[in-house]
Amino acid sequence: MSHDTDKLIRQLSLVAFLMAERRPITARDVKSNVEGYSEMSDEAFARRFYSDRAELLSLGVPLQSQRDEFTGEELYTLRSEQYFLPKLELEDEELAALQTAFYLLEGKFAYAEPLRLALQNLALGRPGFVEAPTDTASRVEVLDPDYSPETPGRLAKLENAISKQRTVKFEYWSISRDKTSERTLNPYALINDNGLWYVVGQDLDRKDIRTFRVSRIRGDIKFATRRERDFRAPTDFDVEQYRGRPPWQIGDIVGTARLEVLGDTAWWVRRAFGTTGKLVDDVFVTDYSSIPQLASWVLRQNGRAVPLEPHELKQEVGAALRRVRERHEGAAPEPAKEKPARVVDGVAERPAGPVAPERFAVLQALLAYLLAACGEEKTAVIPASELLQRFPSVPADELEEHLSLLNLVNFGGGCYTIYAELQGDSVHVDKELWGDTFRAAPRLTPLEARAIRLALEYVGPMIAADAHSPLTRVRKKLEETFGQFDLERSPSPHVGSEEVDLVSKFARAMREHRLVEIEYQKEADSEPSTRLVEPYSLERQLPNWYVHTWDRTSEGARSFRLDRMRSANVTKEKFEPREGFEPTRLRDARTVKLLYDKTIARYAVERGARPLADGTALREVPVGSDEWLEGEVLALRGEAVLLAPAELRKAVAARAKALAKELGVERLRAPAA
């Protein structure tokens, strides 16, 4: 058998022995009775036993130890009430809503398999529970802008390193310096922030805690040593402080800015940035680490935010508007030819598999499922196809091996739980002496708990709407089942109450085909407008929610961002769904071309632009409204230029000139370098 297989048998047998004995046991008891330890020397046993205990604890298995006051020996216990899932008070519709979340996320969610296993355990023993998705699955689309074929494999390797507290090495592309170098990291946590994946940890080369964007890792992620553990995460590490920061606060804070927000913009600033600044009499006060990034935000507001201080911010805004105006007056530049695609050693990088549940957890869940199939009877026959469907992380050609592992648990210890054999297309199960002890589902592992937390973050408002239950209540019930292990390095879902309320209202309106009156503030407007809409579908494009509608006010297909919606009221009036109408965001958009300077071209390439031979980049951008495009070009601060059409170039130049006057920065130049 392989080293990993030996370890799995030892760990499962240790759990079975502790559960069967129901009394404190010593290390000597373990060495004598648990398969895999008896042939070891005392030194090897001490090392392996310590390692197995540590790994089981990291998997959420609540092993406890205390010293015997008379003999001085360490005594070990595993209480069943801490090992199994407690009675879960989720209603059927709440569990069905979670199942729908899985269908929504499958195929684009890196943690789909741990989520599937978690739901498998949560649903175990609930008769009549149907796995088919509700109609929500056809009404919601989830898009992850940072997802690529490589993403799941990288996340899987980092998850493994975090759980085992192993140091990793990888090549990392620093986009600001446009250089790739090897980094050595003690990884503390993975976070998804505004739709982008980051790993946070101690950078051993820079001797500081750093954040690395996962999509900028190049090549393989490797363990730096052969040790079973390299570090311990500091107890005061708080992952929450590394997420939710706006672009102008990433890095060391160097000052505080004051910006006047005009019209009705204040409510939106409070909703979007209330945790990163404060509003005092319509003045937004916010710390900053980057003047240029804050200037970009000011310019994107297109007159709704006026920089008051510092003076350097006003200078940067004035200089940026001058560059925008000058670059959009006259003829557009001619872009260079496209840069040929680069092939490294003639071989493309092979994407790794998605984040997989721990094999130990799969075997735990498989054991519980087989025993639950027996019920009160001693035997059961289960179609092999049913097991493969329930446990897709078990390859078909490895099903027999997994069953054999369960048969070997506590070989020699006398605490057998099951004998399962693959016969043709069926699995024949015999419940052994201790089988009833393991019929219940085990607690969720930390990885499964993280998968549920991420699902709540991605589509939590939809779960709450479908379950007809407040999201906080569903989340609280779930987190009570997560066990007593540490979840400090698993960020809590960031879901605003306004978001939950709006999604719930639109979900109901879609089910009942009711009109909704909304108060909406477009990016280009300082005052909201009132619309009457027919809602058809929701879209979660991280980090934003959209609702796709037929807008009766303007008599056309329109999509609205929920974070810009001041209110939504479901009316009593019903509508007949329009035959053949399938609204999508930017349905009638036209495409324009933006040419990015060398200074920012690599950032644009990361977002889908094509690199050009002279170091610039060209991107085709779908545009739903001229006002949005105007704000986007202004925010680029003259480091990108709109190539066509000519009338839009003139409009951008004219707006840049007028805005400089409105903001009182027309005579200000960039601060000295």
Image (cartoon, helix red, strand yellow):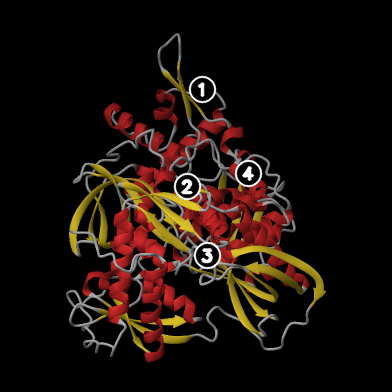
Calculate the distance from the C-alpha at mark 3 to the C-alpha at mark 4: 24 Å
Q: Is residue 15 left or right of residue 231?
A: right
> Which mark is nearer the camera, 1 or 4?
4
Select label 2 or label 1 by which is in front.
Answer: 2
> Of residues 373 and 65, which is closer to you in this image?
65
Foreground: disc 3 or disc 4:
3
> Residue placed at 54% from the left, 64% from the top?
388
The Cα–Cα distance between marks 1 and 3, rounded to whole angstroms, is 52 Å
Distance of label 2 from label 3 (alpha carbons): 18 Å
Residue corresponding to mark 2: 491
Q: Residue at x 65, y 52 (%)?
A: 471
Specify which label sits upstream in the sequence, 2 or 4: 4
Q: Which residue is mark 4?
A: 476
Question: Residue beneath label 3, please?
Answer: 544
Nearer the viewer's eye, disc 1 or disc 3? 3
- Which of the pair 266/490 is nearer the observer? 266
Q: Nearer the viewer's eye, disc 2 or disc 3?
A: 3
Query: Quick check: 45 left or right of 258?
Result: left
Q: Is residue 115 visible?
A: no
Q: Tag 2: Cα neighbours inside 10 Å, few (<14), some, or many (≥20)?
A: many
Considering the numbered disc 2 on the image, is that residue within a helix, a strand or a loop? Answer: loop
